[in-house]
Image: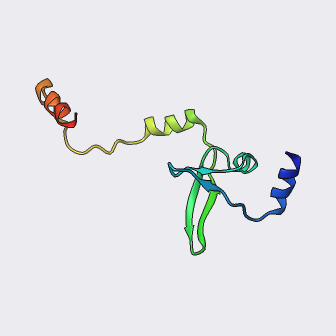
Amino acid sequence: MATHSVVWEKMEQVNVKVDSKGRICIPAEIREEIGNTATLKKTPEGYLIIPGKRQDAVEELHKIITSKHHRTGKPENWSPEKMKSIWSKTE
């Protein structure tokens, strides 16, 4: 395992596989550097993976709760019959 880490430190790029669901398999050493979130940026040469900043879940929830809502107009209060008719169309 240590040999693999030393090799990665000297490499500037690594080939990864994309599975049938479109997921990219990133080696563990790289995942540790990237963290839990990343941004894919399109460049003239292809795509660049940029590590995302780690955010505190409580802080993120607080931002959502305290943000101004974007609703326009007044919401409709639909009858149960109207709701059921919409559900039956999706089944």
The reply, left or right, for residue 73 in relation to residue 67 is left
Residue extending furthest toward the top: 80
In the image, 60 versus 83, the foreground residue is 83
76, 23: nearer the viewer: 23
Identify which residue is drawn at 51% across, 50% down. 20
The image quadrant that residue 84 belongs to is: top left
What number of labels is visible? 0
Colouring scheme applied when the structure was drawn? rainbow
Q: Is residue 28 above or below residue 77?
A: below
Relative height, residue 6 to residue 62 (above, below):
below
Q: 62 or 85, which is in the foreground?
A: 85
Residue 43: x and y in percent read 57, 71
Could you tell me residue 65's position as x and y percent? 44, 35
Looking at the rendered image, the quarter that the C terminus falls into is: top left
Seen from this angle, which residue lies furthest front?
20
Residue 82, percent from left and from top: 12, 30
- Of the 4 image quadrants, the one containing the N terminus is top right
Residue 10 placed where, x, y %?
Answer: 84, 62
- The residue lying at 71 percent from left, 49 percent from top is 27
As drawn, 82 above or below 18 = above
Horizontal arrangement in the rendering, residue 67 relative to residue 33 (left or right): left
Q: Is residue 41 left or right of residue 4?
A: left
Q: Which residue does the image show at 16% across and 35% down from the upper left?
A: 76
